[in-house]
Image (cartoon, rainbow, N blue to C red):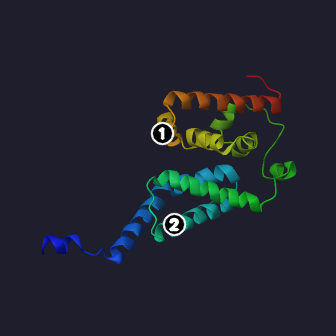
């Protein structure tokens, strides 16, 4: 085969599809559980979190299958999950206190923030995080639910480790203050 022939070789579309399928399957195997936990932390309902996780991966497959590239898989999936979550909440009405109490939230409990995190009291954490912006919620999730190192979170957000450490400290202080204000406790 001459140089001219080798430089004009055609790429077999099946090979391209197989590469995309393999990339997608690798993404599912690597990130499915983390995406589910991220969504479950936000919605507090296993069935809903599973549906949104499935929707996230379906949209990711459609994106890949349309010929587009995904350079940063994890960041792409978290963004897709966040968008699917926004779509879900747009379809839902705001939860009332009665609905939260039916789901197990007890406004009369007195726990400090560290105890809440250790006990995985998802409903209490979700309630305390209601007014936080999306980035703040995701940073708390990555640090305390996914137990990601600060260096990794800082890299995901394009910040220095020092800046991310300060931001996490401020978020936890704000979370603790909200808890204490809501429950009348002092730590």
Q: Is residue 17 left or right of residue 144?
A: left
Q: Residues within 10 Å of mark 1 (few under 14, many from 20)?
A: few
Q: Is residue 81 left or right of residue 121?
A: left
Image point (64%, 60%), residue name = 84
For marks 1 and 2 on the same chain, the one whose residue lies earlier in the sequence: 2
Instruction: From the image, tell me which residue sits under label 2.
Output: 63
Above or below residue 166? Residue 141 is: below
Query: Residue 108 at x, y = what percent?
Result: 84, 37
| Most foreground residue, 33 or 17 | 17
Above or below residue 98? Residue 15 is: below
**Residue found at the very far top of the displayed protein:** 187
Q: Is residue 5 left or right of residue 23?
A: left
Image point (59%, 52%), residue name = 37
Above or below residue 122? Residue 116 is: above
Whole-angstrom CA distance, mark 1 to mark 2, is 25 Å
Query: On the rendered image, what quadrant is the N terminus found in?
Result: bottom left
Q: Residues within 10 Å of mark 2 (few under 14, many from 20)?
A: few
Query: On the rendered image, what quadrant is the C terminus found in?
Result: top right
Query: Residue 25 at x, y = what percent?
Result: 44, 65
Please, what secondary structure does the residue beneath circle 1 have?
Answer: helix
Image point (45%, 52%), residue name = 72
Query: Residue 152 at x, y = what percent?
Result: 47, 39
Instruction: From the image, tell me which residue sits under label 1.
Output: 155
Q: Quadrant of residue 115 in the image? A: top right
**Residue found at the very far left of the displayed protein:** 2
């Amino acid at each position: 085969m001459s140089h001219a022939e080798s430089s004009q070789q055609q790429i077999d579309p099946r090979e391209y599809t197989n590469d995309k399928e393999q990339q997608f399957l690798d993404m599912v195997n690597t990130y499915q559980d983390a995406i589910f936990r991220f969504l479950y932390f936000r919605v507090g309902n296993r069935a809903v979190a599973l549906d949104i996780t499935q929707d996230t991966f379906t949209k990711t497959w459609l994106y890949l299958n349309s010929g587009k590239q995904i350079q940063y898989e994890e960041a792409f999936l978290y963004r897709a999950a966040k968008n699917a979550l926004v779509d879900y909440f747009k379809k839902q009405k705001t939860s009332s206190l009665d609905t939260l109490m039916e789901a197990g939230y007890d406004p009369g409990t007195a726990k400090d923030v560290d105890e809440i995190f250790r006990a995985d009291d998802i409903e209490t954490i979700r309630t305390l995080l209601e007014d936080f912006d999306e980035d703040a919620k995701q940073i708390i999730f990555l640090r305390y639910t996914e137990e990601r190192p600060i260096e990794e979170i800082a890299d995901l957000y394009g910040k220095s480790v020092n800046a991310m450490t300060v931001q996490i400290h401020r978020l936890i202080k704000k979370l603790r203050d909200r808890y204490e204000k809501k429950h009348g406790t002092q730590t």
